[in-house]
């Protein structure tokens, strides 16, 4: 079983790969905000993904600031994204089922059912 830290790291990597697949020109600051981690943490995540060969850096030619990069998923990155997506989905479904069971137990304890408003 993986630890909490490993799950958080995997979640961050999956979210980064997914976001960059959709928009390779996102800045580190934008990615950090979208994923919910610090800019320094995002720098660490991106460096790890580049070192693993899952991302490669390309110049973002449309930017006035030529120091900006585009983060492009490699074929290995696409495969890792698919694998991480499966793991992420399985874990979230397990969490959902556990939460649903807990809600049902709480409703039973309270003697009634609370309906979700649309």
Image (cartoon, helix red, strand yellow):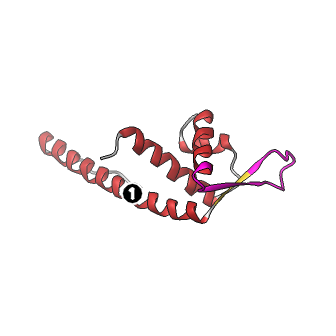
Q: Residue at x 61, y 60 (%)?
A: 21
Drawn side of residue 83 relative to residue 94, left or right: right
- Quadrant where the C terminus is found in the figure: bottom left
Categorize mark 1 by other alpha carbons within 10 Å: few (<14), some (14-19), many (20+): some
Residue range corresponding to the magenta coloring: 51-69
Image location of residue 3, percent across then percent down: 35, 41
Give the quarter of the image for residue 34. top right
> For residue 64: magenta?
yes
Q: Which residue is drawn at 45% across and 61% down?
A: 83
> For residue 60: magenta?
yes
Image location of residue 63, percent across then percent down: 83, 50
Q: Which residue is drawn at 81% across and 44% down?
A: 67
Image location of residue 81, percent across then percent down: 51, 60
Image location of residue 64, percent across then percent down: 87, 48
In the rendered image, the vertical position of residue 37 relative to residue 69, given as above or below: above
Numbered circles on residues, count: 1
The residue identified by callout 1 is: 87
Drawn side of residue 47 relative to residue 58, left or right: left
Residue occupying the far right of the picture: 64
- The residue lying toward the viewer, choosing from 103 and 55, is 55
**Magenta stretch secondary structure, dominant:** loop
In the rendered image, the vertical position of residue 88 relative to residue 5, given as above or below: below
Give the quarter of the image for residue 109. top left
Q: Residue at x 55, y 37 (%)?
A: 37
- The residue lying toward the viewer, choosing from 26 and 57, is 57
Tag 1, which secondary structure? Answer: helix
Drawn side of residue 76 relative to residue 95, left or right: right
């Amino acid at each position: 079983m993986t630890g909490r830290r490993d799950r958080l790291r995997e979640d961050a990597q999956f979210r980064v790969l997914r976001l960059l697949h959709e928009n390779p020109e996102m800045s580190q600051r934008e990615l950090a905000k979208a994923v919910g981690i610090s800019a320094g943490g995002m720098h660490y995540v991106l460096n790890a993904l580049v070192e693993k060969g899952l991302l490669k850096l390309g110049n973002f030619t449309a930017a006035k600031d030529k120091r900006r990069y585009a983060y492009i998923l490699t074929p290995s990155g696409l495969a890792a994204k698919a694998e991480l997506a499966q793991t992420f989905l399985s874990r979230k479904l397990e969490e959902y089922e556990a939460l649903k069971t807990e809600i049902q137990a709480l409703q039973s304890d309270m003697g009634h059912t609370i309906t979700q408003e649309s």
